[in-house]
Image (tube, rainbow, N blue to C red):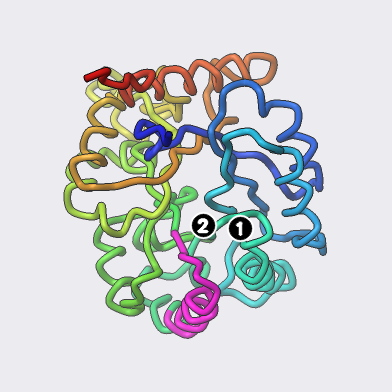
Amino acid sequence: MSNPAKSIRIGTMIRGTQGHAAERIAQIADMGFESFQPFFWQTTNGQNLAELGKRCREAIGDRDITIPAIGMFGNPLEETDVDLQTLQGWKDCIDNAHHFGATCIAGFTGRLRGRPIPESLLRYREIWSELAKRAADKGVRIAFENCAMDGNWQSGDWNIAHNPDAWELIFNETPDDNIGLEWEPCHQMVYLIDPLPQIRKWASKIFHVHGKDATIRRGVIREHGIFGKHPFVFMRTPGFGDTNWTDVISELRLAGWSGSIDIEGWHDPVYRDELEMTGQVHALNYLKSCRGGDFVTDPV
């Protein structure tokens, strides 16, 4: 019998760039994660993705664990050598997603470096219209993470899909059904945007969710503002930040959403380094509880 609780799975991200994704899955597969998102930073380093996908699935074995999405993070709109590697990485991930069992590739849109968001739209349409068609032909969806990477509307190096006004622009440029968002509350909170109403408006465009949170220091904002020397916000592992993930999951379910929330670690200022997996497993159990805990079958 299927477990309705797992219509929303809780998993984690694993690095793929170093070539050890399958080994990492084998190390942590019994910790209770229900999904994994292998991801690459700017380049796949020429890895054989078909072979890597096969090894990742072998590492999972007969466990009830999925690989719903692959991450390919970089700037595919520019044309330096590493940017071209990112673009090729997107093509390779799309073409080989089925070897992982994945149906979604996630990452940044890219942008013309140092330019306002609207100036990137022509290049965005040129690249992503083609990639959207390539993905559709493979039954794959594309999800843009809502991360600014320290950019803003006027300038940046990586991504234009970090602001809801930008979402309106890019979805107008590429109205394809298989282009959407890899959403998380953290990246809205660091710009003091309320994340919950976004689920109600954009749920149909949310293809994948990252489990990352934020702590906003309201006292610092009141005393020092957001451009002073004192940090006003920290990225956090879920369970340690300000977000009520019970509300997030409830809003997702009310919208009829199903999919995976994969924890994005390595950002929490406290639960990192030797405490990294302590924090991630706490987040795993916390998010499962926000999902409602263990599924209970009514004996009637």
N-terminal of the two: label 1 or label 2? 1
Does 112 appear above or below 276? Answer: below
Q: What residue type is labelled 1?
A: Met
**Location of residue 41 in the rendering, given as x and y in whole percent from the top left corner:** 67, 53
Q: Is mark 2 on a helix, strand or loop?
A: strand
Q: Which amino acid does label 2 sit on?
A: Ala
Q: Which residue is drawn at 44% across and 38% down?
A: 261
User: Is residue 188 in view?
Assistant: yes
Q: Residue at x 37, y 69 (%)?
A: 117
Q: Residue at x 69, y 15 (%)?
A: 274
Image quadrant occupied by the C terminus: top left
Q: What stretch is highlighted in magenta?
A: 125-143
Per the image, is 130 magenta? yes
Does 202 appear above or below 238? Answer: below
Give the quarter of the image for residue 129: bottom left
Residue 72's disc is: 1
User: Is residue 195 in view?
Assistant: no
Does 210 appear above or below 294? Answer: below
